[in-house]
């Protein structure tokens, strides 16, 4: 048995205190395999040791929540089919940031694979994927070439995995900032559907039940992936490429079909995928949840190469593997299903009643650890937090535009606001024929064929806002997500979050995390969207430079299945109303806007001010207008302000607007401020719009009429912006591709 | 009419084809497992989209060896209707039921979008209900959908009136804008676009129904597919 030295402990990213705790749990010194097992289970990635005490502040319950945080995914009840069967959705968002920087294609692909397994391991068939992506600027002289290579690889990786697996990638958002150049973010949201009586949990119940391993063979890939995701990047990180796993979406597709079929036999007691920390995590978590023990022999684990040590087998993060527990005596029913699908399934162990995770190798015990302390007694830190990091002034430069129409073109060509068609055309967003609204709208809509309802999904996050004020930025993010859902007529019901932050051991970064969680908790409670699960990704830093604090929110809503009301103006001559009114803005509140970023090229001040009560009233009013079909289009005002919202509504049908308002705001603010609680609608029935708005106590300001081929915006009769739509749309439509094509010439 | 939808390991549009034929067109539809040789009395066999056997080696290259394909070949030889969509089209070319091959898109990227198609002939069981010159809005979703063949084959196809569909704006570099072709007997047709994804208004287009309706009409009138 090898001697554990302090150096070995440190190499496993465990502190001396954590090591002491391990010794006290075991009542002896661990061997190297046991140390490896503890190190991955107690890594930040698996244990949430820095965030856990704050995550408890998040609301997690409502009458629709069937399963909250702690399982593989959250579950929400969405209604009954005609026969009275209850249907549920399972959904979660997860990050694969670090692997995607080291190896963009495989990093992103396996990110998709991991979250899909989290969904179908519960028994749900995945029906939609969305992505929130963050990259460095594409035309940056220093990092541009690498940033272009990363986006190209990430998008291809997501496309490869999702398309082959057969799940539609129905939308998302992509943002570019210098702070992501050394640390891109790849957050993948997935959602699945199933019947409530067919939910499976990751529990190793029933003493004597066989433990079955199924899927790909175990190889040396991804060893210590979870610990890698829990450290900052250094120059050596690029040498960690072997730590990134390889994905095989075809194998995953077979696993999906076989697992769902095997579940329907009734012979499965519990099931969990092998994701981060592989066989280690699945064995100890399944037995810990069930209050049982588990014993496996590694000799039975299918291995890709000879001579792998127990340490390597237990820590491998080879993809497309599942661990399941069958009811004793019915294991052949399960094995037959996997055989039908051509998959390797082996009995590797047994459920015990002693609370111990015992790992043997050809009979010899190589690790023996109490499951519950390993899974649940990871250290929890209340890390010091001070004032959130913020290196920008409150007051910005005077904003004085030379040409407001030219500014609109600048926004249209910007990476953040330009069309993302180049990205989403690479995704099969229609497979399974449920996509009622795909990429490019405020929210995606997936119909659930079994019941008469659809599920709407929106992903949002604004790192600039959260950097300027983590608490308010997080609230704005929740509000925007819910507003996006309301614009398609869906009622927000539940949420999942991905917390992408820097190094939590720095108090000013920890403060960003704490304040963002608290803001999110407030807003989610207020909008009645409990958080049913999610992911925390810390140490998003390269060479000491942190990313903007970048929480990402995924919120789902439920609605009747019917033809969607989109963002686009449909006909000329319709009335355009701004629900919520023009809103308030000042110079300080302009500092986080797209106008500040793209036109002024600076950052300062505060994010827009949010009044949650008013926001909710606006959303309720808009939902009523959309579901009653009083409006022909609805689009919220967010990035780029009112002028940009009008432009986006105009592109699809080249039907623009002739707007004239009466405002005291400076033109730059009027056009480009990003105050929330505002939605642009077009209608042939202005009277009903006004009545509905009045009913909910919100202004419905008639600002103009739709007009073919042109966008004109005036204030008090003075023209501020005037452009033919065709040229504006051309700038917007081609910007991303032309920036990426620079790759060819670089 | 009864449709049989083949399920290969890795098929992922099998359910879509089944749903289009049964729920949207109102006909019988059943799944056919790749390792079974029975076609369960299908009147039309659909080879659906997806990534059969992972499409390792070459798209469709492994599927051609499956037991069900031996039955499909016999069925086709007897004049049975066989429709290959996307990966199904790739399989049909791989196993020699249709000429030509599908290679990587001109832009080297996967493309998913709605495209416009025209039926290049009305003389087929898959196009007879489509008005001449009508543009159909039907989605594509493929990485390897560029149709290629040597000039002699392409000339032969055109001379025999065997081009079933053409792209209005060629998205993938297919030679002579070909989106779908027929075999000599006109009972086997392969196309890269997905008509099953355009069979109800909720999906944004119902134009794909015309392909199915052609077939259903043809079956009902006992139209002989052979010239």
Image (cartoon, coloured by chain):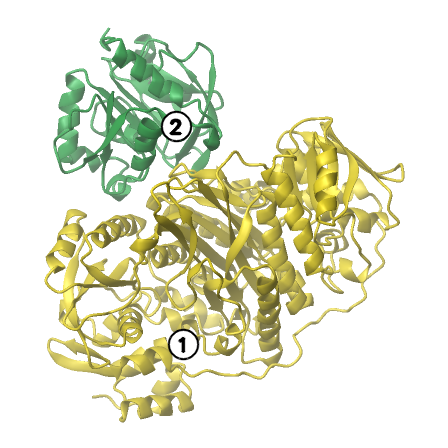
The crowding category of the residue bearing disc 1, from other C-alpha atoms within 10 Å (few below 14, some 14 to 19, many at least 20), is many
State the residue at coordinates (46%, 52%): A154
Colour chosen for chain A? yellow
Colour chosen for chain B? green
Residue A607, x across and y down, in percent: 71, 61
Question: Please, what secondary structure does the residue beneath circle 1 have?
Answer: loop
Point out the image quarter for the N terminus of chain A: bottom left
Residue B105 placement: quadrant? top left
Residue A364, x across and y down, in percent: 13, 81
Asked whether residue A378 is in view, the answer is yes
Q: Is residue A113 above or below residue A6?
A: above
In the depicted view, which residue is nearer to us: A508 or A205? Answer: A205
Mark drawn on residue A685? none
Residue A384, x across and y down, in percent: 58, 84
Mark drawn on residue A43? 1
Residue B193 left/right relative to A336 = right
Total numbered labels placed on residues in the image: 2
Residues under labels 1 and 2: Cα distance?
47 Å
């Amino acid at each position: 048995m090898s001697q554990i030295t302090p150096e070995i402990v440190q190499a496993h990213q465990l502190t001396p205190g954590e090591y002491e705790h391990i010794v006290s749990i075991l009542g002896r010194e661990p061997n190297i395999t046991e140390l490896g097992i503890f190190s991955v289970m107690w890594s930040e990635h698996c244990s949430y040791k820095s965030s856990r005490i704050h995550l408890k502040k998040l609301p997690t319950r409502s009458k629709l929540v069937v399963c909250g945080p702690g399982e593989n995914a959250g579950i929400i009840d969405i209604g009954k089919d005609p026969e009275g069967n209850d249907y549920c959705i399972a959904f979660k968002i997860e990050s694969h940031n670090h692997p995607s920087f080291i190896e963009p294609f495989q990093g992103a692909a396996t990110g998709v694979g991991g979250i899909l397994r989290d969904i179908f391991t519960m028994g749900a068939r995945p029906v939609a994927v969305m992505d929130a992506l963050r990259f460095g600027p594409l035309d940056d002289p220093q990092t541009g070439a690498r940033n272009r290579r990363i986006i190209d690889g990430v998008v291809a990786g997501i496309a490869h995995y999702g398309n082959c697996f057969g799940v539609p990638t129905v939308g998302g958002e992509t943002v570019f900032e210098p702070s992501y150049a050394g640390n891109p973010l790849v957050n993948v949201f997935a959602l699945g559907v199933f019947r409530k009586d067919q939910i499976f949990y990751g529990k190793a119940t029933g003493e004597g039940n066989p433990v079955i391993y199924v899927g790909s063979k175990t190889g040396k890939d991804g060893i210590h992936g979870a610990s890698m995701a829990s450290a900052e990047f250094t120059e050596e990180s690029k040498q960690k490429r072997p730590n990134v796993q390889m994905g095989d979406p075809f194998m995953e597709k077979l696993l999906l079909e076989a697992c769902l079929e095997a579940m329907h036999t009734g012979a499965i007691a519990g099931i969990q995928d092998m994701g981060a920390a592989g066989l280690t995590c699945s064995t100890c978590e399944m037995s810990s949840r069930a209050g049982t023990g588990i014993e496996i022999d590694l000799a039975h684990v299918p291995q890709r190469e000879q001579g792998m040590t127990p340490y390597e087998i237990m820590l491998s993060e080879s993809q497309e593997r599942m661990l399941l527990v069958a009811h004793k005596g019915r294991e052949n029913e399960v094995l037959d299903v996997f055989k039908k699908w051509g998959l390797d399934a082996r009995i590797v162990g047994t459920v015990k009643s002693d609370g111990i995770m015992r790992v043997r190798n050809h009979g010899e015990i190589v690790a023996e650890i109490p499951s519950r302390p390993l899974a649940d007694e990871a250290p929890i830190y209340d890390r010091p937090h001070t004032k959130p990091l913020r290196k920008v002034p409150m007051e910005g430069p005077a904003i004085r535009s030379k040409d407001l129409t030219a500014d609109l073109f600048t926004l249209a060509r910007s990476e953040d606001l330009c069309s993302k068609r180049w990205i989403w055309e690479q995704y099969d967003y229609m497979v399974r024929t449920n996509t009622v609204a795909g990429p490019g709208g405020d929210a995606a809509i997936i119909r659930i064929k079994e019941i008469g309802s659809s599920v709407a999904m929106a992903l949002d996050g604004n790192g600039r806002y959260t950097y300027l004020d983590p608490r308010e930025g997080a609230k704005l993010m929740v509000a925007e997500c819910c507003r996006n859902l309301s614009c398609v007529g869906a009622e927000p019901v539940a949420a999942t979050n991905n917390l992408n932050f820097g190094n939590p051991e720095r108090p000013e970064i920890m403060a960003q995390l704490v304040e963002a969680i608290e803001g999110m908790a407030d807003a989610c409670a207020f909008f009645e969207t409990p958080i049913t699960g999610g992911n925390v990704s810390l140490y998003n830093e390269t060479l000491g430079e942190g990313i903007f604090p970048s929480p990402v929110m995924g919120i789902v809503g439920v609605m009747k299945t019917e033809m969607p009301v989109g963002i686009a103006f449909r006909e000329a001559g319709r009335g355009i109303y701004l629900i919520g009114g023009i809103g308030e803005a000042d110079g300080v509140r302009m500092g986080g806007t797209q106008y500040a970023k793209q036109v002024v090229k600076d950052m300062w001040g505060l994010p827009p001010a949010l009044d949650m009560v008013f926001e909710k009233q606006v959303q309720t009013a808009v939902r009523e207008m959309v579901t009653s079909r009083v409006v022909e289009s609805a689009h919220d005002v967010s990035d780029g302000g009112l002028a940009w919202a009008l432009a986006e509504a105009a592109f699809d049908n080249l039907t623009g607007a002739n707007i004239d308002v009466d405002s005291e705001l400076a033109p730059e603010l009027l056009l480009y401020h990003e105050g929330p609680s505002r939605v642009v609608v077009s209608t042939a029935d202005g009277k009903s719009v006004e009545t509905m708005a009045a009913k909910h106590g919100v202004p419905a300001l008639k600002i103009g009429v739709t007009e073919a081929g042109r966008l004109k915006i005036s204030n008090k009769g003075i023209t501020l912006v005037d452009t033919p739509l065709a040229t504006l749309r051309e700038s917007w439509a081609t910007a991303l591709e032309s920036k990426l094509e620079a790759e060819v010439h670089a | 009419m009864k449709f049989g939808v083949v399920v290969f390991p890795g098929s992922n549009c099998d359910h879509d084809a089944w749903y289009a034929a049964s729920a949207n067109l109102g006909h019988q539809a059943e799944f056919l497992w790749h390792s079974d040789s029975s076609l369960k009395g299908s009147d039309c066999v659909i080879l659906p989209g997806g990534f059969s056997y992972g499409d390792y080696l070459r798209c469709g290259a492994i599927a051609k060896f499956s037991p069900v394909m031996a039955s499909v070949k016999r069925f086709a030889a007897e004049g049975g209707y066989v429709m290959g969509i996307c990966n199904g089209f790739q399989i049909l070319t791989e196993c020699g039921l249709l000429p030509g091959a599908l290679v990587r898109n001109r832009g080297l990227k996967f493309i998913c979008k709605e495209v416009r198609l025209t039926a290049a002939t009305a003389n087929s069981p898959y196009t007879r209900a489509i008005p001449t010159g009508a543009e159909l809005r039907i989605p594509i979703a493929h990485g390897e959908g560029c149709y290629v063949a040597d000039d002699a084959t392409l000339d032969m196809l055109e001379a025999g009136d065997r081009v079933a569909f053409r792209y209005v704006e060629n998205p993938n570099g297919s030679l002579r804008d070909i989106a779908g072709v027929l075999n000599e007997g006109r009972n086997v047709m392969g196309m890269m676009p997905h008509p099953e994804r355009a069979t109800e208004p909720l999906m944004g287009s119902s134009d794909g129904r015309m392909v199915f309706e052609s077939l259903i009409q043809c079956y009902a009138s006992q139209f002989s597919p052979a010239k």
